[in-house]
Image (spheres, rainbow, N blue to C red):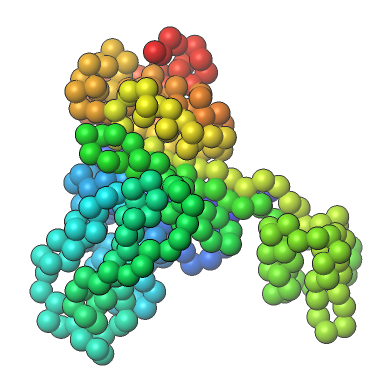
Amino acid sequence: MTWLVQPRLVNDPFSDPGLFVDFRFGRRALLFDLGDVSPLSARELLRVSHVFVSHAHMDHFAGFDRLLRHVLHREAPLHLTGPAGFADRVAAKLAAYTWNLLDEDSADFAIVVDELDQRLSGRWRFRARAAFRREEVAPPSRPAGVVLEEEEFSIEAAVLDHGTPCLAFALQERLRVNVRREGLERLGLPVGPWLNVAKRAARRGDDDDTLIAVDAARSLTLGELKRDALRVAPGQRLAYVVDAAAHAENIERAARLVRGADQLFIEAAFADEDAAMAAERRHLTAGAAGEIARRGGASRVVPFHFSPRYLDRPELIPQQVERAWRGESGFR
């Protein structure tokens, strides 16, 4: 089966956190956190439609200016999501520049900012043609913890404690529907836009007797297509967890968000022997990161956001995370 999205860390594990999620079929990408994004090309940044920012510490938000510079003259909006008070941070960033060259003849670009406090609690729009003046708009109505819902995937969030509210995120694909070329050939069916209709019907769970028009002369039932030409499987789940104190409530909340993740990208800032330092700075230890992965049933764990104090021992954190993930260490 082919995944809808392809995730990769923006930087090495000792540098700014960030996850770039590229859509395999489409000119689109997502970003989780917005620190140093210089490793991303201009083409990649131009594809970013949504950015999910955990919190506004510099290493998670300093890349806003670079991204804005690339997308400023496109028509498609840029959507940002962050914790309570995040819109104030975006407004302050935008207010730092002079926008006298923007007017009604400029590209109709806009930044849309959502804030999450258990539920979406506010939405604001900043339009380029209005020199990015702040405009409050009604936020969409979504279930608690859901920050984005689209036909092919949704994004969930949980509020964790980092001495300030910090969001963790999970991307859940809907059912994966891939085309079996050999099945199409066996049925004598062409590749075409009708396949997108069939795939959407399969994702929605439409009845097997639903008719799918191939062209003006031929239709097949969805059941026939699922038997011979479509492969249906559960969608991928990705989770992204950063900057959280290693206390019981955070671990429980993060594990609930992670639940069944195919891939978990999680901070492991400090080694287990430095738990006191981790507690003081409200970061996860390697053991806590592995425990979240174990409780959440993650299939693959990618630790990152390591303290530079371990640069001479780069293998230490991953080893401790893996032991806790497999239940081989006594994390408490």
Q: Residue at x 87, y 83 (%)?
A: 217
Q: Check the image and name the residue furthest to the top.
A: 330
What residue do we see at 51% from left, 24% from top?
294
Which of these two is toward me, 175 or 191?
175
Whole-percent x, y for residue 332 in the image: 39, 13
Q: Quadrant of residue 11?
A: top left
Place of residue 331 in the rendered image (x, y in percent of width and height, measured from the top left): 40, 13
Count of numbered labels shown in the rendering = 0
Residue at image location 81% in from the left, 80% down from the top:
215
Residue 152 horizontal side relative to residue 45, left or right: right
- 247 or 31, which lies in front? 247
Is residue 143 at least partly visible in the picture? Answer: yes
Q: Which residue is painted at 37% across and 27% down in the image? A: 249
- Residue 330 at x, y percent in the picture: 43, 9
Measured along the vertical axis of the image, is residue 1 above or below residue 252? below
Q: Is residue 158 left or right of residue 274?
A: right
Whether 280 is drawn above or below 261: the answer is above
Query: Where's residue 302, x and y in %?
Result: 44, 33
Residue 70 appears in view: no
